[in-house]
Image (spheres, rainbow, N blue to C red):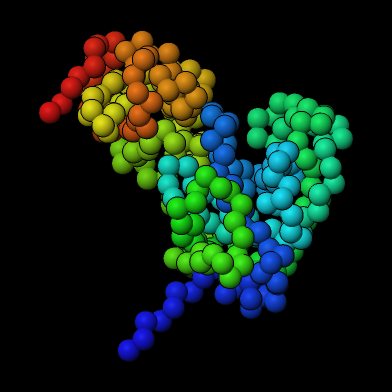
């Protein structure tokens, strides 16, 4: 019995009637903006800002991007998961003509610092937006891929009934990596911003644990974002260590009572 070939994203491009040579696949996962929303969160929560992010591209990428149709995907921080977010028509305008607000940081994106594209959403394959996940393959460093016959298609690994995210699990069950802080849903952000207290920071590599206090206006979320940006959050015991992707948790209230007196203690190593 012959093996059934994997369904790929290229199959959907063919069904939509778009010429393969005129389509570029883009995987947005930008690690330059620590402490700001991930590109995935930008797409999920601020579509206009996500579109603004796509509109500007670096000088030198013109040959790779030279195609009338873009199929953008977003990668989840700390993961290889890749989500389809739409089909777009894209046309190069030229160097950015004026200063403008940066869509990720809110700072200034200077005039002439990058190329500006006229990017507009298309109805093609819109039924798969936020539902279709693909296996991108090993070429994560190259964010633009072609889908001509010389390259294998992106296998479709999951098609969900709708775009949805998990409900907030509660403080006792919450465990996050620092990379995931920039992707959590708005409801999670609200709960963590409004709450302060003791938390546990764990290094998965060495299994060392650090106890900290979130007491500022930003609550747990504000404190954890400091770690995500600096790697140490001002914690002297963590400075100079490898930039391990620590895990943060709050734990059961009884555990918090036991560890509160250790907030300024030296790291505890567990075998």
Quadrant of residue 258 within the rendered picture: top left
The residue lying at 44 percent from left, 36 percent from top is 179
Q: Is residue 268 visible?
A: yes
Which x, y percent locates residue 205?
26, 32
The residue lying at 35 percent from left, 39 percent from top is 174
Which x, y percent locates residue 92?
81, 49
Q: Nearer the viewer, residue 151 or 179?
A: 151
Look at the image and tell me in which quarter the N terminus lies: bottom left
Which x, y percent locates residue 17?
70, 76
The residue lying at 23 percent from left, 20 percent from top is 259
Which x, y percent locates residue 22?
72, 65
Quadrant of residue 175 within the rendered picture: top left
- Residue 24 higher or lower than 171, as above or below: below
Look at the image and tell me in which quarter the C terminus lies: top left
- The answer to whether 19 appears left or right of 97 in the picture is left
Residue with the most extreme bottom position:
1
Q: Nearer the viewer, residue 172 or 38?
A: 38
Q: Is residue 222 visible?
A: no
Residue with the most extreme right position:
97
- Residue 188 higher or lower than 167, as above or below: above
- The answer to whether 140 appears left or right of 211 in the picture is right
The residue lying at 49 percent from left, 57 percent from top is 136
Q: Nearer the viewer, residue 188 or 55?
A: 55
Residue with the most extreme front position:
150
């Amino acid at each position: 019995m012959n093996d059934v070939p994997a369904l790929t994203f290229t199959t959907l491009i063919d069904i939509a009637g778009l010429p393969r040579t005129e389509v570029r696949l883009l995987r947005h996962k930008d690690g330059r903006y620590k402490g700001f929303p991930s590109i995935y969160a930008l797409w999920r929560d601020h579509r206009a800002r996500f579109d603004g992010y796509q509109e500007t591209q670096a000088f030198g990428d013109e040959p790779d991007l030279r195609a009338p149709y873009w199929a953008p995907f977003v990668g989840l921080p700390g993961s290889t998961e890749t989500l389809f977010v739409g089909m777009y028509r894209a046309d190069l305008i030229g160097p950015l003509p004026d200063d403008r607000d940066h869509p990720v940081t809110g700072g200034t994106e200077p005039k002439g610092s990058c190329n500006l594209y006229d990017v507009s959403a298309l109805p093609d394959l819109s039924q798969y937006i936020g539902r279709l996940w693909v296996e991108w393959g090993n070429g994560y460093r190259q964010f633009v891929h072609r889908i001509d016959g010389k390259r294998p298609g992106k296998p479709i690994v999951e098609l969900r009934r709708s775009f949805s995210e998990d409900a907030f699990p509660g403080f006792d069950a919450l465990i996050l990596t620092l990379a995931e802080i920039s992707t959590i849903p708005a409801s999670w952000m609200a709960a963590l911003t409004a709450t302060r207290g003791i938390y546990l920071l764990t290094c998965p590599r060495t299994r060392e644990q650090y106890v900290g206090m979130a007491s500022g206006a930003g609550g747990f979320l504000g404190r954890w974002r400091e770690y995500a940006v600096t790697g140490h959050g001002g914690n002297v015991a963590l400075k100079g260590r490898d930039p391990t992707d620590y895990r943060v948790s709050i734990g059961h209230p009884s555990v918090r009572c036991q560890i509160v007196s250790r907030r300024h203690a030296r790291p505890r190593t567990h075998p």
